[in-house]
Image (cartoon, grey):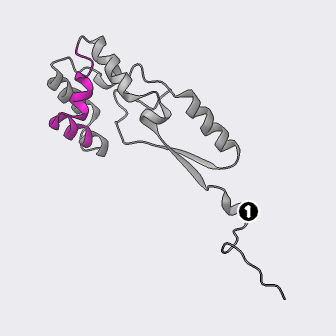
Amino acid sequence: MTPSFTNGPQKPAHQDRYAAVIFDFGGVFTTPMEDTARHFAREIGLPDEAYLHAVAVHPTGRRLYEQLERGDISQEEWNASIAALLGIDGTNLMGRALATLRPEETVVAAAAAIRATGIRTAILSNSMGLTPHNPYKP
């Protein structure tokens, strides 16, 4: 009898498929968040990095963003507090800041193609609140 050699246990073909693919929302399923932040800063007359710095680098801004993502503060509270850091009007700040954010069409198409094969797809995101601006509404 000739011995049989393998590279370990063989998996059935159906186990080679992924069960699901999860996409992040901001900057993956959408155009880059940094580009949107820079565009907004220029639009309101601030240096290119001002808004991005306020929400991602400044200690108070980072804390506020974390609180918003956890649902500890409302979008309205976040708008007013970030606006105070920037010295601007906070009315619908998030809506104004994300006005140029768009779906990343190549990723959307890839997600649709993956889903069409029967693989479950999902989009996950930290919460930014839904009012007054719903960032997830097309």
Q: For mark 1, what is the residue? A: 13
Answer left or right for 1 relative to 56. right
Judge by depth and name the residue closer to the eye, 94 or 130.
94
Q: Residue furthest front?
A: 2
Res. 132 image quadrant: top left
Q: Position of residue 24 (x, y in %)?
A: 46, 41
* Magenta stretch secondary structure, dominant: helix
User: At 24% across and 42% down in the image, what residue appears?
Assistant: 67
| Residue 44 drawn in magenta | no
Res. 60 image quadrant: top left
User: At 60% across and 39% down in the image, what residue appears?
Assistant: 111
Answer left or right for 125 relative to 54. right
Q: Residue furthest bottom?
A: 1
User: At 25% across and 30% down in the image, what residue appears?
Assistant: 76
User: At 42% across and 34% down in the image, what residue appears?
Assistant: 26
Judge by depth and name the residue closer to the eye, 120 or 130.
120
Q: Which residues are magenta?
A: 46-66
